[in-house]
Amino acid sequence: MANVEILTKEMIRPSSPTPEHLRNLKLSLLDQVAPPVYVPLIFFYSFDELCFDTISHAHISQLLKQSLSDTLTMFYPLAGQIQENSFIDCNDSGVEFVEAQVHARLSDVIREPNMAELNKFLAVNPTGVGIATLLAVQINFFDCGGIAIGVCLSHKIADGTSLVAFINAWAATCRGEVKIRQPYFDLAHLFPPRDLSGFSFTPNDGITKEKIMTKRFIFDKEKLAMLKKVAAAASGDGSQVKNPTRVEAVSAFIWKKFMEVAKNKMDVKKMYVAVHAVNLRPRTSPPLSEQAFGNCWRPSFAFISTSGDEKNGCPNVLPVLRSSISKINSDYINQVQNGEYLKHLSKSKDMFMKGDIELCNFSSWSRFPVYEVDYGWGRPCWVCTTTLPFKNVVILMSTPCGDGIEAWVNMLEEDISAFRS
């Protein structure tokens, strides 16, 4: 068990004040409907690769704080405060910066990670309870010399793509890079904010107070090849998908397992639904840069009816998954932009609240360049997330070598043993 001792806490502000004309940044519609939780990432850097014996903790801490302050000048909204789910007051109030000493060996922590303990390496609770700052960072110094950098960014202002873009910009600044890719903050022009008071949904929808546990399942190169082969095989109804991706194959496999758990519990559902977070940036016309900062994603919905599938087992879900994602097209984006999407979102919430639908949510972070985050002492030996307050949520991340996938499965504690078997 890792004993984490908090050493210091302080607020880091932008190194240059935000100009007056940039002090008020409107949230986009996609920010408004985003859940009020943090998106957490933890980056582990081992002593063996870093040779920290010549660099003091105080020097490392100062480098990280100064480069964070400089980076916040570019990413100025992160040091502000959200007002009324409408805009960010970019008042340079700062971000939380925590230093901690970990009385354990980094190698022991990452060899057999305890999911419940990973939150100790974060400055705030990812559930977002009592959110004080939009960004919170914790630098963890291990007794062995390794370092873990935990970053939590409010989902109200950013998605995973933007979080990783910020972290890479911070790392580049820390290692002395001069040319940093500049973010731009005008998604509210593309997805104008709306008055949400007349709709039945809230950003808190989906957040549960039930006991959620997280398990990590690793799919190496060989397992992925096997899953892709199985996923590509034609089913009894003749449906087939050619050249399934790694994410498609793993998603289909896990979704089927969720269905089996529900059936074994005799939890009769009329419909199984797989929700996939889809990045809208490459799907707009013209495509947006990855530097478009904020929430720029929407969920796709794949539906499988339970009628008749008890006899034939779980159906071939991959064609349904691929078809649902393909519907996130220009027509769909137009509906989001003109506000028509809100009616569909409200209807979806009403349907899901009836209780006869089993949801399984996926978000793929496997292409995020998290293993490129180099602060000047090399790349991380492992990058992970933590438990999120949502039932049946699966985060897909790349393995350190890049050819595998780690599936982080969040589900009810009572369902974990049945799922693992």
Image (spheres, helix red, strand yellow):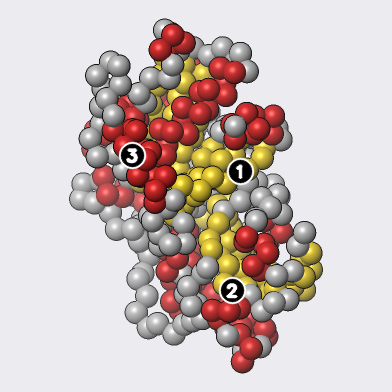
Element under label 1?
strand
Residue holding disc 3: 228
As rendered, which of 210 and 69 lies closer to the eye?
210
Identify the residue at image location x=54%, y=37%: 393
Which of the two labelled residues, at mark 3 and mark 1, occupies the earlier sequence position?
1
Q: Amino acid at mark 2?
A: Ser
Of badges 2 and 3, nearer the viewer stands 3
Which of the two labelled residues, at mark 2 and mark 1, occupies the earlier sequence position?
2
Spatial distance from mark 3 to mark 1, Cα to Cα?
22 Å
Identify the residue at image location x=35%, y=23%: 316
Q: Quadrant of the C terminus?
A: top right
Q: Would you call the spot at circle 3 few (<14 residues within 10 Å), some (14-19), or many (20 or more)?
A: many
Say whether marks 3 and 1 touch (CB < 8 Å).
no
Q: Which mark is residue 46?
A: 2
**15 over 38 or under it: above or below:** below
Residue holding disc 1: 215
Element under label 2?
loop
Spatial distance from mark 2 to mark 3, Cα to Cα?
33 Å
Q: Position of residue 125 (x, y in %)?
A: 68, 52
Q: Quadrant of the N terminus?
A: bottom right
Q: Amino acid at mark 3?
A: Lys
Q: Would you call the spot at circle 1 few (<14 residues within 10 Å), some (14-19), or many (20 or more)?
A: many
As rendered, which of 235 and 357 lies closer to the eye?
235
